[in-house]
Structures are given as structure tokens and as C-alpha cells.
Image (cartoon, rainbow, N blue to C red):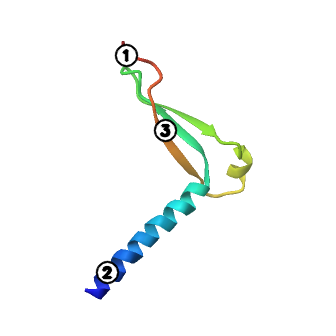
């Protein structure tokens, strides 16, 4: 029982730590616009204030995904 409790506490600490680490390294957002039903989704890269300098220095980057349709269907 103690082993299971320690595993659960370790998982919770790992999830909290992982969210903190990945949230601070976000360099921008990937906006996905699916408002046009006749074509596939449009993808837009929106960089934060860190800009392109943050991308050039890293092998991998973290983007926040923003799902928003900008053209109304009305």
C-alpha cells in the first residue's frame, strides 16, 4: 500500500514539474483555423516576444496550440 501511495505522489510531482518546465519554454503558438469547410486546416505560426532568436538556438521548440476559427459560418 505504501508503494502505491509513493508512486501516486511521484506521478503527481512529475506532472506538476513537467508542466512548469514546458510552459516556460513556449516560444509562440500554432494557430489552427478550420473555418473553410472546402479545404483543409490552415496553420499559422505566431511567435512570442522571444521571436526567431529563440528558435535559432534550439533543436526543439514548444508551441501552444490555438484552435480558433476566424471566419463565421453564418
| Viewer-side residue, 42 vs 7 | 7
Above-or-below relation of 56 to 2: above
Tell me what residue is drawn at x 67 percent, y 57 percent. Answer: 58
Above-or-below relation of 36 to 20: above
Rendering coords of residue 70 (x, y %): 47, 23
> Which residue extends farthest top?
74
Tell me what residue is drawn at x 50 percent, y 65 percent. Answer: 18
Residue 20 sits in which quadrant?
Answer: bottom right
Which quadrant is the C terminus positioned in?
top left
Label at residue 73: 1
* Circle 2 Cα neighbour tier, 10 Å, few/some/many (<14 / 14–19 / ≥20): few
Mark 2 or 1 closer to N-term? 2
| Viewer-side residue, 6 vs 40 | 6
Tell me what residue is drawn at x 51 percent, y 35 percent. Answer: 31
Task: Assign a secondary structure to mark 2.
Answer: helix
| Mark 2 vs mark 1: in front | 2
Above-or-below relation of 15 to 35: below
Rendering coords of residue 26 (x, y %): 59, 51
- The residue where tag 3 is placed is 66
Tell me what residue is drawn at x 45 percent, y 72 percent. Answer: 13
Amino acid at each position: 500500500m505504501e508503494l502505491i501511495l509513493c508512486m501516486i505522489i511521484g506521478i503527481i510531482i512529475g506532472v506538476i514539474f513537467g508542466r512548469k518546465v514546458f510552459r516556460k519554454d513556449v516560444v509562440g503558438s500554432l494557430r489552427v483555423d478550420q473555418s473553410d469547410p472546402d479545404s483543409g486546416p490552415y496553420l499559422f505560426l505566431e511567435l512570442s516576444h522571444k521571436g526567431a532568436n529563440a528558435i535559432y538556438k534550439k533543436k526543439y521548440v514548444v508551441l501552444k496550440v490555438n484552435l480558433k476559427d476566424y471566419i463565421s459560418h453564418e
